[in-house]
Image: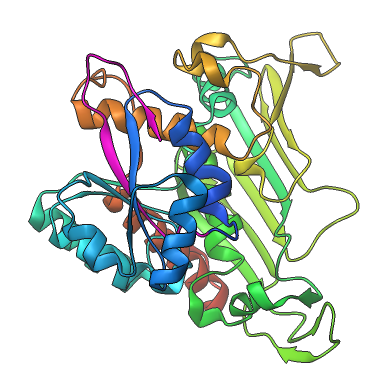
Amino acid sequence: MISTSPHQEPTRVGVVGLSASGGWAATAHVPALAGLDGYEVRALSASSTESARAAGEKYAVPLTFSSAEDLARCEEVDLVVVTVRVPQHLELVRPAIGAGKTVFSEWPLGADLAQAEELAARAHRRGVLTAVGLQARSAPPLRYLRDLVAGGYVGRVLSTSMPGSGDRWGATYDDSHAYLLDARSGATLLSIPFGHSVDALAMVLGEFRKVSAHIENLRPEVTHVTSGAVAAKSAEDQIAVAGLLRSGAVAAVHFRGGTSRATAFHWEINGTKGDLVVKADQAQWWSGRLRLYGARGNDGTLTELPVPVRYERSLTQWIGRSGEPAYHVAHQYALLREQIKGSLAPDTEGVPDFLHAVRRHRMLDQVRDAARTGQQVTL
């Protein structure tokens, strides 16, 4: 599986967690890498020799391993991509760092702040390039949105509001997502949907300065979708955060578990001269199609704002494919490739790294502190 220019050596990729039965690696990472110049998916690892061999045959990956340690030691791998469940990130990212490889880990980086700090510290000591899968930062519509705000489209930003649904953490669960019921897994409504979303908000509008929060588990028992078995749930299913951004603008973010018949995701930015809106039809909006709308001045009607082609970063093979799960991931890999080659323009923001992930983990802990104490927290 090779896609590269004949004049450049490809970055050879090893994927930890690629399965023949599907999953996020197969849905997003493999198509993204296959559709870009400069990458070769050279190796994979799975939980057993048999499952690794099956995945290798399905995706035409020549080197297969039954452990992340063996993959990390492979001399034919330059970039290790970790796409497994959050509770396994620490043990599977460590070997890649130890081997001195460039490492891409899905978000959240760790099950908690301490794990994220450990991985970031290890990577810093080893001097390796790191990336974390907060792919909304690479999404063309959001980069365009950031430029519209910075260019004064809405004037001075007064407020922003963002209601969304989590899809998971609702009234039911299935076998493959049972681990999400346990708050200790690190894969929660706060860390995943809220974390992706607030990171995008910060990218466009700047970080929070103060927050107040409510985090509740209003469904402590949930039902299996097929068997009807009732299970305990310790993970939260309601998050409401209000605060001030560093700019002084007021922000309100509300995420609820499960789905809503009304709104999967809606993001509104209001300013002195106009308004901007981002809409998505799916709860996991950071991996789906985004629609951008705006109105300003005397125009009282929101109209759709097409994203200029220049935001596609010359990825001609991805133009018009914004609804595909691999779309935003592909743009993230394109930025990472420029970082690997050392050709990223000085004024261009790259892929968020492990240090950025630590800052986001720390912010989420501060939101939890605000909810626990009932006090406003300064970030």
From which residue to which does the magenta span run? 1-19
The extreme right residue here reads 261
Q: Could you say where residue 352 lies in the image, as x and y percent from the top left?
A: 35, 42
Quadrant position of residue 52: bottom left
Residue at point 51% right, 32% down? Answer: 204
Foreground residue, 294 or 129?
A: 129
Count of numbered badges drawn on the protein: 0
The color scheme shown is rainbow
Image height of 23 relative to 365, above or below: above
Quadrant position of residue 334: top left
Image height of 322 relative to 358, above or below: above
Residue at point 65% right, 52% down? Answer: 253
Foreground residue, 63 or 126?
A: 63
Image height of 204 relative to 273, above or below: below
Image quadrant occupied by the C terminus = bottom left
Foreground residue, 338 or 359?
A: 338
Q: Could you say where residue 26 lies in the image, as x and y percent from the top left?
A: 54, 49
Q: Could you say where residue 19 lies in the image, as x and y percent from the top left?
A: 51, 60
User: Magenta segment: does it hold 12?
Assistant: yes
Q: Is residue 276 left or right of residue 123?
A: right
User: Magenta segment: does it hold 320?
Assistant: no
Residue at point 18% right, 55% down? Answer: 74
The answer to whether residue 378 is seen in the rendering is no
The answer to whether residue 276 is seen in the rendering is yes
Residue at point 54% right, 18% down? Answer: 317
Image quadrant occupied by the N terminus = top left
Q: Could you say where residue 126 lies in the image, as x and y percent from the top left?
A: 9, 55
